[in-house]
Image (tube, rainbow, N blue to C red):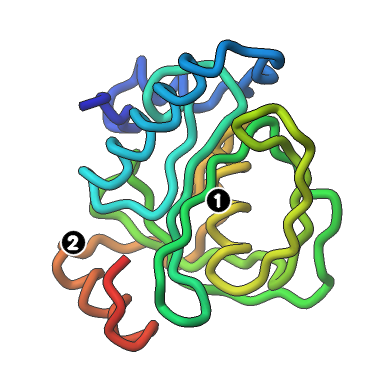
Amino acid sequence: MAHILKVSEKKEEKFLRNKTKPFPFPAEARRVRELVFDMKQAMQDANGIGLSANQIGLETRVFVAQVPDQNGHLKFYAIFNPEVVRASEETSALEEGCLSVPGLYGEVERPERITLAGFDKNGRPIKIKAWGLLARVFQHEIDHLNGKLFIDKAKHLHEAPTSERLKRQEEKIGGTRQ
């Protein structure tokens, strides 16, 4: 399993705060598949819903996410060289946490809707309109790729055991575990 970098380690925090470099397309398909598989596995092993490449020590612009759709089915995303190209003026503040900042949570204000542009694993351009939790996860991961952490913009930071956080999150999304 890939090691997830933590802000509690000075060297790792310094790495997390660097902006990542564009993923080089075209790329060998096997290399891309392995990268996506490793990132998805690390995210799932850590009970996360998103993971950026720099969280596992890679300097490249790619993230993975797995978020429930409107029917509660998990949908997986692997986005290369992502950028937010449009964001709504309407914002909302919700609690966020991070695999690189374990046990710490805080309220983060973000646009409710975004349009994300990037590339799929085959290097084909994609555009995704996202709202709700999906938009929030995309923005959180893009912040990572830009060297920013949720704790830089969070209000009301507090510690909470993971079990407490998962219970609250399950209540918010109707019992679906992320």
Task: Identify the amino acid type marked 1.
Answer: His
Could you say where residue 25 lies in the image, as x and y percent from the top left? 70, 16
Quadrant of the drawing holding the C terminus: bottom left
Residue drawn at x 53%, y 48% is: 77
Residue drawn at x 25%, y 60% is: 159
Could you say where residue 90 lies in the image, as x and y percent from the top left? 78, 77
Residue 52 left/right relative to 136: left
Task: Identify the amino acid type marked 2.
Answer: Thr
Residue 126 left/right relative to 44: right
Q: Residues within 10 Å of mark 1 (few under 14, many from 20)?
A: many
Q: Secondary structure at mark 1?
A: helix
Q: Nearer the viewer, residue 5 or 108?
A: 5
As displayed, is residue 51 above or below residue 24? below
As displayed, is residue 145 above or below residue 111? above
Residue 140: which disc? 1
Residue drawn at x 24%, y 54% is: 103
Quadrant of the drawing holding the N terminus: top left
Q: Secondary structure at mark 2?
A: helix
Are the residues flagged by discs 1 and 2 in contact, CB closer than 8 Å? no
Residue 55: which disc? none
Q: Which of the 4 quarters of the picture holds residue 82? A: top right
Residue drawn at x 40%, y 22% is: 34
Residue 118 left/right relative to 160: right
For the question of whether residue 147 can be seen, the reply is no
Could you say where residue 56 lies in the image, as x and y percent from the top left? 37, 25
For the question of whether residue 104 can be seen, the reply is yes
Mark positioned earlier in the residue sequence (1 or 2): 1
Q: Which of the 4 quarters of the picture holds residue 119? A: top right
Could you say where residue 108 lies in the image, as x and y percent from the top left? 55, 64
